[in-house]
Image (cartoon, rainbow, N blue to C red):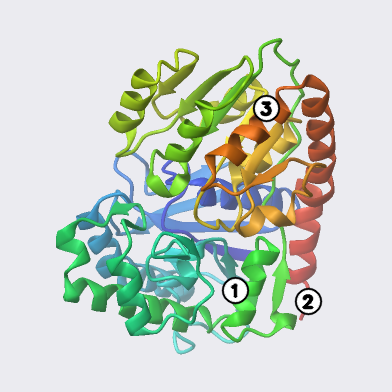
């Protein structure tokens, strides 16, 4: 079996958990005898072709380098699809593949047409982000509630005018009141949906993503719900004073404001570390200072290779995202390490956490509820129970063996 993975970015040039999950899958499949070639973007300082273990990585596609920059996103939108199609076409004329595996949202925009793709090559797509199903990329209507509407042009404009963010960008007035941007975002959304519907097999990373695929007309027999790979980690001893951890972007939609407000209400002894970066960094530091939260520390983003060690050094991991995420890799990694997790009752994590058994689900826009969940987890017996059950859950759903076995069955199905 020879599979071509298409991804806009690839480790060590990762832009999020999606690339890390795709990399884990590629390496696990390669250990089972699948020949994996990754076609990804050019990255300054990295070779055009390299071998990562048994995985061959080709960096040949042109794209923008910073998903948090408006100008870079324009480059990604205009350049990446054409460059990806061109490079895929070149590869297909020189090499033989059994499957084309598009592993993230942006890679779908580079999907080749049937005229380019030789007969017999199967197409797979990973649905691992709400960006597939929302022009803003958040699935939040006017930033206030989870969106369940059919996104018509008029409804999108109304939503956009009442939103403070889109994607990872602040919705400043020069974006918000720009009809050309409305048109571009909505048109891109429709094109993305059109491309998404052209695949043969769909991998949904959660039941939440499966439901979104069903809503756009993909038949259930073509959708397979398969977790990302998360390996069990060695459990570390708990601290006498619980250590709390937030790991992620400092963005409004990640719920960091609500988390800080919650920390002012928590009764009990704890320390809390934030690790990340983003436009709210200054505001967050000012809040910590003004409220004398001396036990709360704001830190810069840590490299990917230090994530597991950082999780291991804490007792309670909190991810209060306001947007319904497909799946939080950080939460799954924390569960695999036997940690108590507190996360949003929105999106895909509801598939992995039974309330009070594997973790605590909270309404992320209610600081009082977040504070109560933290107080619950300050008890060592509660943390031990949640962590133990969470670890078992990950072993059942997300081990490399389970995930690769499911993929091998798919690959071997005619």
Q: Nearer the viewer, residue 366 or 21?
A: 366
* Residue at the (33%, 61%) spot, across then down: 163
On the question of residue 200 being in view, the answer is no
Horizontal side, residue 4 vs residue 236: left or right? left
Q: Is residue 142 above or below residue 298?
A: below
First in residue order: circle 2 vs circle 3: 3
The residue identified by callout 3 is: 375
In the rendered image, residue 400, in percent from the top left (x then y), is placed at 75, 47
Q: Out of 23 and 193, give the one closest to the viewer.
A: 193
Q: Residue 414 versus residue 251: which sits nearer the camera?
A: 251
For the C terminus, the image quarter is bottom right
> Around disc 1, counting alpha carbons within 10 Å, would you say few (fewer than 14), some (14 to 19), or many (20 or more)?
some
Q: Is residue 341 above or below residue 178?
A: above
Task: Nearest to the eye among marks 1 and 2: give it.
Answer: 1
Q: Which mark is residue 381?
A: none
Residue at (48, 51) in percent of width and height: 57
Q: Position of residue 198 (x, y in %)?
A: 53, 84
How far, Cα to Cα, is label 3 from label 1? 34 Å
**Residue of label 1:** 212
């Amino acid at each position: 079996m020879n599979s071509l993975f298409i991804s806009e970015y690839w480790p060590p040039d990762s832009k999020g958990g999606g690339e890390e999950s795709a990399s884990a899958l590629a390496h696990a499949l390669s250990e089972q005898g699948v020949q994996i070639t990754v076609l990804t973007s050019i990255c300054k300082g990295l070779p055009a072709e390299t071998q990562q273990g048994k995985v061959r990585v080709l960096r040949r596609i042109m794209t923008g380098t910073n998903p948090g920059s408006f100008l870079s996103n324009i480059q990604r939108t205009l350049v990446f699809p054409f460059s990806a199609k061109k490079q895929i076409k070149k590869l297909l004329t020189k090499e033989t593949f059994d499957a084309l595996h598009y592993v993230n949202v942006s890679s779908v925009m580079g999907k080749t047409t049937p005229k380019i793709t030789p007969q017999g090559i199967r197409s797979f797509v990973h649905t691992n982000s709400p960006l597939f199903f929302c022009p803003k990329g958040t699935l939040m209507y006017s930033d206030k509630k989870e969106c369940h509407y059919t996104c018509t042009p008029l409804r999108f404009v109304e939503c956009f005018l009442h939103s403070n963010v889109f994607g990872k960008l602040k919705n400043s007035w020069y974006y918000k009141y720009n009809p050309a941007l409305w048109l571009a975002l909505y048109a891109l959304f429709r094109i993305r949906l059109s491309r998404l519907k052209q695949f043969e097999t769909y991998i949904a990373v959660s039941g939440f993503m499966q439901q979104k695929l069903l809503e756009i007309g993909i038949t259930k027999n073509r959708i397979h719900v398969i977790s990302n790979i998360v390996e069990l980690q060695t459990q570390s001893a708990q601290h006498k004073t619980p250590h709390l951890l937030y790991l992620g972007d400092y963005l409004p939609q990640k719920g960091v404001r609500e988390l800080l407000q919650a920390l002012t209400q928590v009764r009990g002894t704890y320390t809390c570390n934030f690790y990340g970066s983003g436009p709210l960094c200054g505001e967050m530091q000012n809040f910590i200072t003004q409220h004398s939260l001396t036990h709360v520390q704001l830190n810069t983003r840590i490299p990917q290779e230090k994530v597991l060690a950082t999780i291991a050094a804490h007792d309670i991991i909190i991810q209060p995202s306001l947007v319904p995420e497909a799946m939080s890799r950080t939460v799954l990694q924390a569960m695999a390490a036997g940690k108590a997790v507190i996360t949003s009752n929105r999106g895909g994590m509801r598939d992995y956490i039974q309330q009070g058994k594997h973790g605590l689900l909270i309404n992320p826009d209610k600081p009082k509820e977040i504070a109560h969940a933290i107080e619950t987890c300050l008890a060592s017996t509660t943390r031990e129970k949640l962590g133990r059950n969470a670890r078992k859950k990950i072993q059942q759903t997300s081990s490399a063996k389970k995930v690769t076995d499911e993929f091998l069955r798919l690959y071997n199905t005619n």
